[in-house]
Image (cartoon, helix red, strand yellow):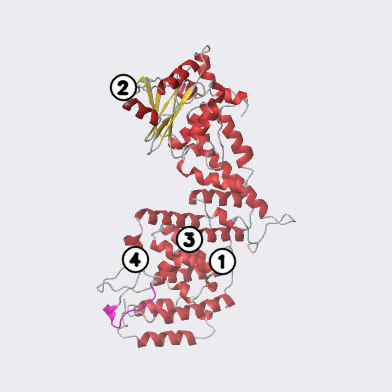
């Protein structure tokens, strides 16, 4: 450390006491012991103190105090080094006790810092503007910093900067310190190279040039709202990520890459919070990314944050004991919802709604199976009816790609937050037939829009899919004749090239005991 940097730590003391050598006592405490390095002391007083400690007349109490206290003299050109060594100890509480006694008590959340007013006032415009109130404690003044961004950890780093100590800026703390410096108004008007300028330059020229560091900073913004929004930290991080991802999605000819290219950035983006993820995807789409790439990114995010989709819906597969009122549901309603907190359910609901809202309009952007899984989860978590209808339309556009198992949607009761009806007195079908019927209607509407009124391979495959679906629901004794007939007649007559599958479904339905319910 050069003389200028070392002397800077004691500059403000020397301004007040220009004729006196400045020394500091650095006190560090932990649960085991208290060691003290006495403060501003002259060389003569230090020597007399040392000689007095060797006196044979010292009493037991004084000797015990000497065992607990070790004193060293730290001249002004070693202040910064000594303070740095003391403050770098993360497991200890530090305080500085110079010859000038601490005159300011600062409270940040549950932590209290006893410091000197002048170093803070000289660099923090906010502290300087405060009308400091006299304290009833041992300190002349006290300040409470409400809603301080970054909490005690950030304020501790700010104190190091105010005392002229080296400050380590890194991706983990840069967002905190940028917000903290703005809170304390540490601008260039007070001092050249103040903390606002340093943190802004580090963020702009170091962080935003690195993909990994930008992701880290964006994740650290979760607890710093609204400061990170007002300072445009989130927006700049999202734009930087989108620009780098979009650049990766361009081939050597400048054309958008296809979804078959496994983009390296998908996993990193999938770790972001849902609102940050939405902003990144929106920015990537605005830069002309391929819809298949956007769809793949959405699927990767859902796989990470909604990883229980298959497990939660797998339990609803068993059928009842024989008998119309003997249908028992082996479902997740108790296992899933009782084990998870309401906050977790609300978070998943928000994720599902946001993912639906950013689905690319292109038909091939996401597969039909993924859409149906999202539809099932939407019903489980009581997503808004408008978004459920949007999903049903999307499924109808790609229905020929679905399988029978994909269409077996459990019959949830929305008002009970996804719980299935288990009472034997309520005769409800095990699967949601109305949703499938609406999906078929949307499929037919899409076919008409495409002006494909003649039998097509798409209609033919959907007719086989519907007949297989009818054979599955025919095993449910609560399916009424009307419900079965409505689904069987959902497709026009010319859609079926062969009726064998429909006959097999009817035969299965007629063999199920007590299945002749007309309503």
Q: Tell me where residue 25 appears, x and y as whole percent.
A: 46, 25
Q: Nearer the viewer, residue 59 or 231?
A: 59
Q: Quadrant of the C terminus?
A: bottom left
Q: Residues within 10 Å of mark 3 (few under 14, many from 20)?
A: some
Specify the label residue 390 is tagged with.
3
Which residue sits at x=62%, y=24%?
3
Q: Tell me where residue 160 appears, x and y as whole percent.
A: 51, 30
Q: Which residue corresponds to mark 1?
A: 449
**Residue 264 visible somewhere in the drawing:** yes
Q: Which of marks 2 and 4 precedes in the sequence?
A: 2
Q: Which of marks 1 and 4 precedes in the sequence?
A: 4
Q: Nearer the viewer, residue 289 or 200?
A: 200
Q: Tell me where residue 329 appears, x and y as whole percent.
A: 32, 73
Q: Nearer the viewer, residue 83 or 486?
A: 83
Q: Which residues are magenta?
A: 316-326
Specify the label residue 136 is tagged with.
2
Under circle 3, the secondary element is helix
């Amino acid at each position: 450390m050069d003389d200028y940097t070392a002397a800077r730590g004691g500059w403000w003391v020397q301004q007040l006491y220009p004729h006196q050598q400045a020394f500091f006592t650095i006190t560090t405490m932990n649960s085991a012991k208290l060691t003290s390095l006495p403060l501003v002391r002259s060389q003569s007083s230090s020597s007399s103190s040392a000689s007095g400690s060797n006196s044979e007349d010292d009493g037991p109490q004084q000797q015990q105090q000497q065992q607990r206290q070790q004193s060293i003299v730290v001249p002004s050109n070693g202040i910064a080094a000594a303070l740095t060594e003391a403050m770098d100890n993360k497991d200890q509480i530090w305080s500085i006790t110079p010859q000038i006694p601490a005159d300011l008590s600062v409270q940040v959340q549950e932590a209290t810092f006893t410091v000197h007013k002048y170093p803070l006032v000289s660099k923090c415009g906010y502290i300087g503007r405060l009308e400091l109130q006299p304290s009833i404690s041992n300190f002349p003044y006290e300040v409470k910093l409400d809603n301080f961004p970054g909490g005690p950890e950030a304020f501790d780093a700010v104190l190091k900067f105010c005392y002229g100590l080296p400050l380590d800026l890194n991706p983990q703390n840069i967002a905190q310190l940028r917000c903290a410096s703005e809170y304390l108004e540490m601008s260039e008007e007070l001092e050249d190279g103040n903390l606002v300028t340093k943190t802004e330059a580090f963020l702009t020229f170091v962080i935003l040039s690195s993909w990994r560091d930008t992701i880290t900073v964006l994740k650290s913004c979760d607890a710093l709202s609204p400061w990170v929004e007002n300072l445009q930290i989130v927006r700049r991080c999202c734009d930087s990520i989108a620009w780098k991802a979009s650049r990766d999605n361009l081939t050597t000819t400048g054309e958008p890459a296809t979804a078959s290219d496994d983009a390296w950035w998908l996993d990193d983006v999938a770790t972001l919070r849902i609102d940050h993820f939405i902003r990144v995807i929106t920015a990537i789409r605005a830069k002309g990314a391929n819809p298949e790439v956007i769809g793949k990114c959405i699927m990767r995010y859902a796989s990470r944050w909604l990883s229980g989709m298959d497990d939660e819906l797998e339990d609803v597969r068993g059928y009842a004991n024989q008998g119309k009122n003997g249908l028992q549901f082996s479902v997740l309603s108790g296992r899933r919802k009782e084990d998870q907190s309401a906050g977790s359910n609300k978070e998943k609901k928000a994720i599902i709604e946001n993912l639906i809202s950013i689905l690319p309009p292109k038909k091939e952007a996401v597969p039909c199976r993924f859409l149906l899984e999202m539809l099932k989860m939407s019903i489980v978590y009581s997503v808004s009816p408008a978004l459920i209808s949007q999903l049903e339309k999307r499924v109808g556009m790609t229905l020929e790609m679905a399988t029978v198992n994909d269409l077996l949607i459990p019959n949830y009761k929305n008002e009970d937050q996804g719980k299935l009806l288990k009472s034997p007195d309520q005769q409800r079908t095990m699967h949601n037939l109305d949703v499938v019927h609406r999906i078929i209607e949307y499929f037919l509407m899409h076919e008409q829009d495409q002006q494909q009124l003649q039998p097509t391979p798409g209609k033919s495959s959907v007719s086989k899919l519907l007949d297989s679906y009818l054979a599955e629901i025919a095993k449910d004794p609560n399916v009424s004749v009307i419900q079965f007939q409505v689904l069987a007649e959902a497709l026009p007559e010319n859609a079926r090239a062969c009726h064998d599958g429909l006959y097999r479904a009817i035969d299965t339905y007629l063999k199920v005991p007590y299945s002749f319910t007309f309503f």
